[in-house]
Amino acid sequence: MAKTFVVTLKKSTIKCTQDQKDAVRVLGLKKLHQTVEVKDSAAARGNIMKVQHLIDVVVK
């Protein structure tokens, strides 16, 4: 069974760089307090690390 991450956007992206805003969008997050399930991959891990100060992550 593949590992997944449950990612929740906790802070706004208003004062973030464009790279961080793009990373949040790639993860599938559009609104505050929205939660999505992301499959474990190198790209997903990189995007999570880039915006770790904005999100909460739970390994499922």
Image (cartoon, rainbow, N blue to C red):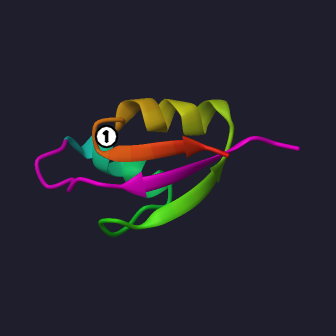
Q: Position of residue 49 (x, y in %)?
A: 43, 30
Q: Which residues are magenta?
A: 1-16
Residue drawn at x 88%, y 44% is 1
Residue at horizontal 36%, vertical 35%? Answer: 52
Q: Is residue 53 above or below residue 13?
A: above
Q: Mark 1: give few (<14), some (14-19) or many (20+) Cα within 10 Å.
A: few
Q: Main secondary structure of the magenta part?
A: loop
| Relative to 45, residue 20 above or below | below
Magenta stretch encompasses residue 3? yes
Kind of residue at badge 1 = Asp
Name the side, left or right, on which 21 lies relative to 45: left
| Residue 19 in picture, x, y percent from top left | 31, 40
Q: Residue at 42% of width from left, 56% of height from top?
A: 8
**Farthest-out residue, left:** 15
Which one is in front, 24 or 3? 3
Left/right of residue 35 with respect to residue 39 in the rendered view: left
Quarter location, residue 12: bottom left
Left or right: 1 with respect to 12?
A: right
The percent coordinates of residue 50 (x first, y second) are 37, 32
Residue holding disc 1: 19
